[in-house]
Image (cartoon, rainbow, N blue to C red):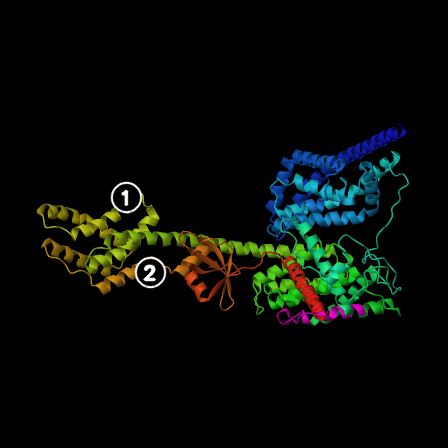
Amino acid sequence: MNNSGSTDNLRANSDRGLTAVREMTLAFSRDAIKTFLHTVHDRLIDYAQKPSEETRGFEFLHARSQISNRHNEILRIFVREMDRYFDQFASGELHDPAVEGSGDETLALMNQDVLEEDLALSAIRTRASVDYTEPLWVLTRRMTRLVGGKSTEHRVPVSPGCFCQALQRSLADIDIELPVKLVIYKLFDRQFVRQLAELYGQCSVRLEELGVLPDLRYQIHKAESADSARFTGAQPQRRRVPQSPSLQIPTLEDVVSPAPLALPSEQLSPAEYQNQLLDSIQLLQDRLVARTPDQRRELTGQPLQYSARQLVEAAVQLQQFNQLMAADVLEAAREIKPFDIARAREQLVNQLQQITDSKETPALGTDDARIIDLVGMLFEYILNDEQIPDCVKALLSYLHTPFLKLAFAESDFFRRQDHPARLLLNTLADAGAKWVSNDGSCEFDMLEQIRKTVRTVLDHQDVDTRLMASLLMSINSFVQKVELRVKLLEKRAMEQARGEDQLYEVKQRVNREIHRRVAEKDIPSAPLLFLLQPWTDYMVLVLLRFGDAGEAWRQSLELIDDMLWGLELTGAESEWRRWRQHYPWMESQIQKGFDMIGYDANKAFKLKRSIDRIYQLREKNLQPEAAPAELRNKLVQLAERRANERTRSTDQEKVVLEKLRLLEFGSWFQFRDGRREKVAWFNPDSMQFLFVDQTGKRTGMKSGQQLAQAILAGDLQIVTGKTKPLVERTMETIFKDLNLQVQSVSQKDRHVG
């Protein structure tokens, strides 16, 4: 009875506490978002009067009008979303807003607008979480106690991320350009988020009054960030190696006969796939160390080890040294020499010894050694990536030490696919692959943009997520402008190509209509020349201008039939009478055709006189001489070339043509000289392909048969580049190579045994 009553009281207090926090939060949200929207309405007019280079004034005015018209709807959706987060929290279904808003589809870099929007909100979430660390920590613990579960500040409905996500969803259906939306988010950070400290304090006091953890005091359970304090030479400390789920100590079975590991299933979610891939890499690292005596490390117990702050401090000082060394090298981006990654570990250990000033040299912890090895392998494999030009790879190699510091300071660097540092590295590599050539020449000054970004990272002593996110937004903005320009050029080229393709199909149809009528007949030279050249041009113009349903197209076909009929008259008087009545119409149609296509007057006069003579002979019942076979074949072949008629394909060409028919827009082809061009558009029926270069400029149209012949001759090949970003595909390559190394060492051991 007592236990039941105690449980009921606890549940009642929990319900009262959660209800109280919900009511306070919703009331705060209504008032604060209403004030914020009024502020936005007033400030947008200021921005409209001072438009920047990226944003025209009318976009701010349009957004201001949209927000004014849908003010109540925005307010309602915002409060509804916050209320929904409380329901999810009570049922244990509330997810981290950062993860929910940054799924694989969002951060696949297919939509740059969504990416920049997410990064802006991520920066707000991160800044607010740091600014309100203490009140948010206390409130989170008390709210978690209400639902009897475990949580973090990111999984409570009052977290900064929830407010950011509620705003994002309330603006989702409103027509606002990205630059304006980023301004609104900045105002949200200044006007709305800055008031959260007061809300957290009031909610925490209310829960304390209800008896929820009344004696709770803020505590720091993890080491301070390297950015919050500098290490000045203290002795190394003994620290326990954390045993996380990802740390797998090699067993005796692993050491004796390790089985090769398989890549994680592609069916997993991106986050789970990345976690399993990293776990597998770490296991392979441990297996390799366990089987290599001179590299074996202690995996258990509490050895004397460097602290996290010492490792970060060493990386910072090493970065300063590298910064001075690279200052002159980075000035000439095209002639840059790659950073010596092989010496990085040795330099780091030497720097650690200088920092600690200890007679006893501590051992690198298992996790620390893994990080050093993995960052080193990451950049070594980047230097071997065939998709990136050498000058770009050399530039990126100088990011090794800043990324090593970042990996020491932020444990989720290798586990988060959406980590700004990883996205920045992927974006720089992708931009270099697209717009920089192996000889260092580039389009849109892209090599200089990459150099400036690398230079900025090296010049900052405090390399953290915020810096990486800022640089990522900057380079994405530049890349987005370049891609927009390329798309516009490609669009113009495609419009032109569609017109040419229509002309190509019309020419083929006209050629086939004429060929079908004259193929089996012996025709004199003059009528044959007339039909295969000027009359063909006239019919093409008629079909393009009026289509095949018009009277002009019907009459153009009738003229061909009448000319052939005149050559086959039997001699009956009735036929000749009908012919003489019809011939003036034919003459007028022929002259009409000459006039419409602007045919040379002298050539037209001679050709028409030659045709008249032939029919004069026919009126005398004489048979004119047919065109010689050589001349006929020449005229037919010339007509086929003018109509771009394909010759008969070989069996091998047919196989390649079927593959080309299934090609996707945007596929790249590489020529024998290393030049690359992209298929911006093609017609699977006519098999005409539009090619553009890396800048989006048109390079020409090619037929499917031309491509098939070039592919079979080895002059051209389809580039089957990997679709995964740089870091992701490099991690998979590291996994595969470590797997092979472990198997190789294992086989050697068995052979020696």
In the picture, the quarter occupied by the C terminus is: bottom right
Q: Nearer the viewer, residue 741 or 655?
A: 741
Please tell me whether residue 339 belongs to the stretch shown in magenta.
yes
Say which of 425 and 616 sits in front: 425
Name the residue type under label 1.
Answer: Glu
Kindly identify the residue that appears in the image at 65 percent across and 43 percent down: 45
Q: Earlier in the sequence, mark 1 or mark 2?
A: 1
Q: Secondary structure at mark 2?
A: helix
**View extreme (top): residue:** 1
Quadrant showing the N terminus = top right
Write down the region rendered in magenta.
Answer: 329-349
Task: Specify the quadrant of the image occupied by residue 283.
Answer: bottom right
| Crowd class of label 2 (few under 14; some 14 to 19; many from 20; radius 10 Å) | few
Residue 653 at x, y percent in the picture: 41, 60
Front position among marks 1 and 2: 2
Q: Amino acid at mark 2?
A: Arg
| Residue occupied by mark 1 | 551
Which residue in the structure is indicated by mark 2? 641
**Res. 606 image quadrant:** bottom left
Q: Nearer the viewer, residue 591 or 301?
A: 301
Q: Position of residue 432 (x, y in %)?
A: 60, 62
How many angstroms separate mark 1 from mark 2 (CA)?
A: 28 Å
Whether 511 is drawn above or below 190: the answer is: below
